[in-house]
Amino acid sequence: MFEQIRCLKECQTLPVVQNHWKFQSEETLTAYFVAINAIEPVLNEIFKRLQGQLSKLDDEDIKLKDYNVKRTEKKTGFKFHSKQLEEMNIEIAFEFGGDYSKFFYFGYRWIDQQKSNDKLAQSLFTEFGKRFKGGEPDEDWPAWTNWNEYFSKDEDFILVYNGIFCMAVKEKVNELIEIALLAKEKM
């Protein structure tokens, strides 16, 4: 394995000819494929670790629910619930719109679309918009925004691994609860 890694480092310095790597040996080509094949297990382990970190955020008031992060599927992510949010028929959601290196967003989702409330939707959109530049509401999301600080580059996975992202999620959840309660009060 170490020999393959050494060969991969060698490969990174090789000239590119017509957008193709020019491999010096079978070993460098093998090392390249070892690295490519390691991506999925490494990312799976990072997101398993994230699930454990997020579940530790649970307390009396807020609970992690529906953790479902899968690289190959769209619209996967995780949600937080509380009694106060459930009374408003909303949940706090963090979701990937594509593979989990693009289009990461957060906001409020309706728990039951059939019970959505237009006044609450407008109030959530207004109060949310005072703090975040949000997207247009739709039937699922009364208020949401892209979270571009994470998952836009490979180095961001280190922030997930070491818990920095989890702490940022905790801050967002607390802020979103505060916004939701204010929106309910103002409607």
Image: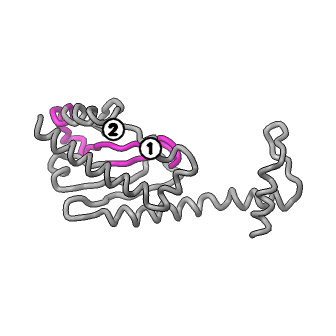
How far apart are the alpha carbons under marks 1 and 2?
11 Å
Q: Which residue is drawn at 84% across and 44% down?
A: 15
- Give the vertical position of 148 relative to 159 (above or below): above
**Residue 144 numbered mark, or none:** 2
Residue 122 location (% of width, % of height): 20, 31
User: Residue 53's spot in the image, x, y percent?
Assistant: 39, 64
8 lies above or below 115: below
Horizontal side of 90 relative to 23 (left or right) equals: left
Residue 31: assigned label: none
Residue type highlighted by circle 2: Trp
Q: Residue at coordinates 10% horizontally, 40% vertically from top-left?
A: 185
- The amino acid on which the numbered mark 1 sits, given as a three-letter code, is Phe
Q: What element carries label 2?
A: strand
Q: Which of 65 and 150 is in front in this view?
A: 150
Location of residue 83 in the rendering, given as x and y in whole percent from the top left corner = 17, 56
Q: Where is residue 16 in the image (x, y as percent from the top left)?
A: 82, 42
Nearer-N-terminus badge (1/2)? 1
Quadrant of the image for the N terminus?
bottom right
10 Å neighbourhood of mark 2: few (<14), some, or many (≥20)? many
Q: In this view, does 103 lie to the left or right of 11?
A: left
Q: Decide: few, some or many residues near mark 1? Use Cα within 10 Å; few <14, some 14-19, many ≥20.
A: many
Specify the segment rendered in magenta.
Answer: 93-122
Q: Which of 18 and 87 is in front in this view?
A: 18
Question: Which mark is on residue 104?
Answer: 1
